Amino acid sequence: MGSGSSSYAPRAIYLDIDGKVQKVLFSSHCTPCDIKELLYSSSNIPRNTAIMMVDPEGALVSIDPTMPTNNPNSLYKVVPVSAGQLGEKEDMFQNVLSQVAEQFSRAFRINELKTEVANRLAMLEKRVELEGLKVVEIEKCKNDLKKLRDEMTSRAGGRVNCPCKYNFTDDGKKLTPRRDYTLSQETIEALKKPTFDVWHWEHNEMLSCLEYMYHDLGLVKEFNMNPITLKRWLLAIQENYRTNPFHNFRHCFCVSQMMYGMIHLCNPPGEKLYAIITLILATDMARHGEILDSFKHKVDYFDFTNEEHVTCMKMVLIKCCDISNEVRPSEVAEPWVDCLLEEYFMQSDREKSEGLPVAPFMDRDKVTKPTAQIGFIKFVLIPMFETVMKLFPQIEEIMVQPLRDSRDHYEELKQIDDVMSEVSFFGLLALYEQLQQREL
């Protein structure tokens, strides 16, 4: 993520310009207009000329950030559009305008946006009709559409594009010998809560927090640990973690801190979590259904004196902590979504380059934050935490309700994304530009 987000990674297409290969780079944040500017510059075509792009077979290629990438052996060509084709585009534009109001009425589920968008779109249609798409008016239409899209995004809570604020590239750096940190009482209390902001802490500080947890849970005393040995062991763990975007030492600390918080919140009787290998293997999502079903069959008549019951409970608790980011506040949770998607995309990009099949939930061309999170929260997180809630009702307000709120938030974002896709503002802008060029 460098910046923490995969959305900034450049994409490339290759053009045939008078028999020579021209490489064009752009990011997923470019608009179709931005990409057209690059095409004009690369192909030396005047900017007042309508253009289209075709593949080696003559098939049209969409000019937008989602266009398929090619290679130097399969070049795209940029060609001017004839006047006859412009006439066809004008007819298409008229059809699009007549359908926009109906699409908004059918697609919108958010009442306050529905009325406002319908009114603004009607105003734009009237402006286009009355003033004949004059050049100056076209610019006003573009600005209004951009302003409307920005307002819709801001109403979604500003979370549509939230690059990961944690730069993971320094995760693997060696730590210098450290002094002991004295944790404040405020930090000690914060460590016990899911609201703990894991992004504000350096590795040395996280190591000191881990040491405190070991002492506070009585593990150092019970196992007669040498405190110096504990320090060296924790430091060795930190230094041997890989610099992955998601599965790194900070994630390790998150899981530990969440388990520490659950122990304080739930206060389960009996011995603390010593079956290390069993619990680590329990975090494998391939065993999710098996482990949760086993716990569901025990939870209604749970026996804390039954070793099998207690082991199953520990397995479910560590599973909850391992995938608990959405329990945390949104400003803490969302950067983890960026980090996880980045790790997925890095894997799927390599699989594509090697001709291997790619899992749909790892494909950067198919996944968005809302689509990635909604199903996971609804069908994995909430059912698991609600089952644990039967045994420990005190987690509902602190852990289960934030999950429900997160689910509702991402469903609202998906509704907005769906509307934006159906109406296709950028498609309208492209038609405006073509008509503008014809007027000129």
Image (cartoon, rainbow, N blue to C red):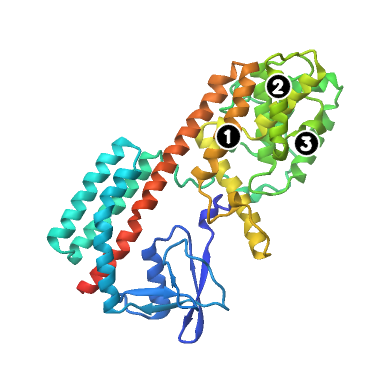
Which residue matches tag 3?
Answer: 281
Tell me the SS state at disc 2.
Answer: helix
Q: Position of residue 120 (x, y in %)?
A: 23, 47
Tell me: 431 left or right of 212.
left
The local crowd at label 3, few if under 14, some if 14 to 19, many if 20 or more residues have their Cα within 10 Å, is few
Q: Nearer the viewer, mark 1 or mark 3?
A: 1
Image position of 51 (left or right of 276) = left
| Res. 297 mark | 2
Q: Residue at the spot x=31%, y=53% of the render? A: 146
Amino acid at the residue labelled 2: His
Disc 1 or 2, which lies upstream in sequence? Answer: 2
Number of numbered discs present? 3
Number of residues whose C-alpha sits closer than 10 Å to that of mark 2, classed few (under 14), some (14–19) or many (20 or more): few
Residues at discs 1 and 2 in contact (Cβ within 8 Å): no
Chain-order first, disc 3 or disc 2: 3
Kindly identify the residue that appears in the image at 52 percent across and 63 percent down: 10
Q: Nearer the viewer, residue 1 or 55?
A: 55
